[in-house]
Amino acid sequence: MKYNEEQNVLYLKLSGQLSKEAILSVLNWARSDEKYKKSTGRIWDFREADLSSVDAMTIIEMAQYPNEFPTETSDVKVALVASADLEYGLGRMFEMATESSAAIQVFRSIAKAEDWLAR
């Protein structure tokens, strides 16, 4: 996890074979960090991640997880970055299934995600 205080962006980089539990563990760990603020933009970097063991129902279930913390997800932008087609497609599925007030978008590059967060 890396925090850019000037841009108010938290970078969460995941790699290797991932499960729902692993991803939610990272989210919970980030939430417990003192730098985590509800207005902080987030970039989830899945470029080195393998989500082949995560099915569609798991993505939909994970998309509902932020609803448990509504005050932390309002007025925040969340960028998912994935270069491989599978991870990008699962990111789009997550984006479409999310019912929180957070703005979520999927990108293929960190630079485009950063540009979007800066707007």
Image: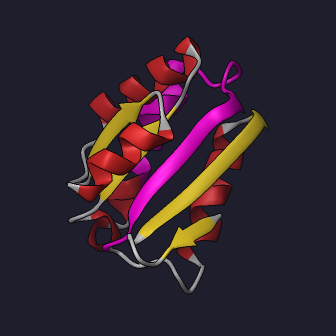
Expressed as whole percent of the image width and height from the top left, the position of residue 86 reads 56, 15
Point out the image quarter for the C terminus: bottom left
Q: Nearer the viewer, residue 3 or 92?
A: 3
Expressed as whole percent of the image width and height from the top left, the position of residue 103 reads 24, 49
Residue at image location 38% in from the left, 50% down from the top: 114
Range of the magenta residues? 39-65
Determine whether 41 is above or below 51 in the image. Answer: below
Q: Nearer the viewer, residue 36 or 19?
A: 36
Residue 44 shown in magenta: yes
Residue at image location 59% in from the left, 78% down from the top: 32
Residue 43 shown in magenta: yes
Determine whether 45 is above or below 55 in the image. Answer: below
Residue at image location 35% in from the left, 75% down from the top: 38
Left or right side of 31 for 50: right
Please tell me in which quadrant of the rendered image residue 41 appears.
bottom left
Left or right side of 106 for 35: right
